[in-house]
Amino acid sequence: GAVVSQHPSRVICKSGTSVKIECRSLDFQATTMFWYRQFPKQSLMLMATSNEGSKATYEQGVEKDKFLINHASLTLSTLTVTSAHPEDSSFYICSAGRGGADTGELFFGEGSRLTVL
Amino acid sequence: GENVEQHPSTLSVQEGDSAVIKCTYSDSASNYFPWYKQELGKGPQLIIDIRSNVGEKKDQRIAVTLNKTAKHFSLHITETQPEDSAVYFCAARRAGTALIFGKGTTLSVSS
């Protein structure tokens, strides 16, 4: 199956700093990538849809200026949490679908656990 | 947009018993329905999926059924084993959109 890689898997940062998370499709081109956030014992909540070469579409309640998404190539999307605060501590997961015909399946990264002190 | 409801939130069974988790969805245009197993600290792992042109799909001890008219789908695990203990999520989407997840079911299989 298709592989999506996320980096870093874990990151700890101080309050007020920014953190960048990378999501790469290793063996396929992903026109669209999706970013999710998961708090402890909760479900995956869609944050934004990232389209290659255009601005991301954010879900209601997600601050676009705080969660910067860049999808500059067909294999890489990045999520930058700016001026992180403890309430941003969460598990961030990306997923991607193959370019071309949408067969339904999305492929998930391993997730990135962010802890803000 | 799509809304997915999942029940039950927790499920405890004895080893060897069957487990059933049910989900309903709201968007009649959704055509892809996967089930994921998530272990602590890891990303979701696809265990089985079904598309809207199929009513049932089976893979060894796992099966999924889909009722498009009622807009619900179910996961069936037979002969449960302790290693089946995890959180299970259902999800739904249509082409070009994101997967929308249910709230999850914590399955505990005791030996």
Image (tube, coloured by chain):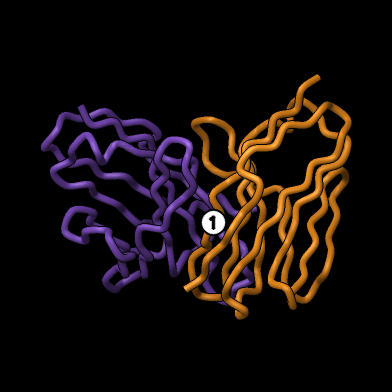
Chain colours: A purple, B orange
Q: Is residue B53 above or below residue A36?
A: below
| Count of numbered circles on the image | 1
| Amino acid tagged 1 | Phe
Q: Position of residue A88 (x, y in %)?
A: 26, 41
Which residue is pictured at 70% across the width and 37% down the height?
B11
Q: Where, by quadrant of the figure, is residue B15 drawn?
A: top right
Image point (82%, 52%), residue name: B63
Given residues A11 and B111, the one toward you in this image is B111
Q: Quadrant of residue B17?
A: top right
Q: Is residue A32 left or right of residue A59?
A: right
Q: Nearer the viewer, residue A64 or B12?
A: B12
Q: Residue at x 60, y 80 (%)?
A: B29
Instruction: Work out whether residue B93 or residue A95 is closer to the camera in this orientation and state it.
Output: B93
Left or right: where does residue A20 sit relative to residue B68? left
Query: Could you tell me residue B69's position as x and y percent?
Result: 74, 78
Label 1: which residue? B101
Displayed quadrant of residue B57: bottom right
Helix, strand, or loop for circle 1?
strand
User: Where is the C terminus of chain A found, in terms of image quarters?
Assistant: top left
Q: Chain of mark 1?
A: B
Going by the picture, which residue comes out furthest to the top?
B111
User: Vertically, is A96 above or below B26?
Assistant: above
